[in-house]
Image (tube, grey):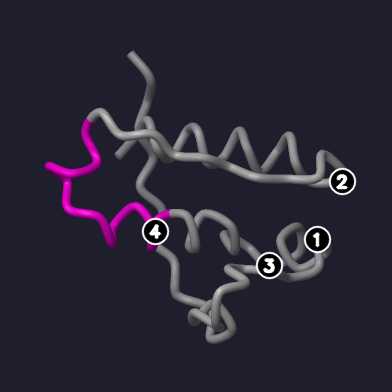
Amino acid sequence: PIPVLTVQTTPYEDQRPTGGGGLRRPTGLFESQRNYLPNFVQSLLSSVDLRDRQGCTMVVGSDGRYFSKTAIEIVVQMAAAN
């Protein structure tokens, strides 16, 4: 079994939706702000009803540079935990 870790965190003010661009921020922000990416991913997962999440597909886009591998690992782990 995979251990599930519950992390207490608070939202970041700049993670509010801003048009159709999604969450576009400098890579350094994701790396320097504690739980910045997990907060955003969990908010997306929580916005979809659990019954609708089961069996669906999540697509992660990236240009493949910098923080991509780590970010994708975090998204996959959180999706599995949810």
- SS for tag 2? loop
- Please state, as top left, top right, bottom left or bottom right, where the C terminus lies in the image: top left
Residue under the point 44% across and 66% down: 9
Q: Is residue 33 above or below residue 82?
A: below
Residue under the point 73% across and 34% down: 69
Sequence-wise, the earlier of marks 3 and 1 is 1
Q: List the residue tagged with mark 4.
A: 44
Residue under the point 49% across and 62% down: 40
Q: Which residues are magenta?
A: 42-54
- SS for tag 1? helix
Sequence-wise, the earlier of marks 4 and 2 is 4
Sequence-wise, the earlier of marks 4 and 1 is 1
Sequence-wise, the earlier of marks 2 and 1 is 1
Residue 14 lies, in percent from the top left, at 59, 83
Q: Is residue 31 left or right of residue 78?
A: right
Q: List the residue tagged with mark 1.
A: 27
Q: Nearer the viewer, mark 3 or mark 1?
A: 1
Q: For the residue carrying disc 2, how many other residues have a C-alpha within 10 Å: few (<14), some (14-19), or many (20+)?
A: few
Q: Nearer the viewer, residue 43 or 54?
A: 54
Name which residue type carries label 3.
Gln
Name which residue type carries label 4.
Leu
Q: List the residue tagged with mark 2.
A: 66
Q: List the residue tagged with mark 3.
A: 33
Q: Is residue 30 left or right of residue 75?
A: right
Gap in angstroms between the C-alphas marked 4 and 2: 23 Å
- SS for tag 4? helix
| Circles 2, 1 touching at the beta carbon (< 8 Å) | yes
- Please state, as top left, top right, bottom left or bottom right, where the N terminus lies in the image: top left
Residue 71 lies, in percent from the top left, at 66, 43
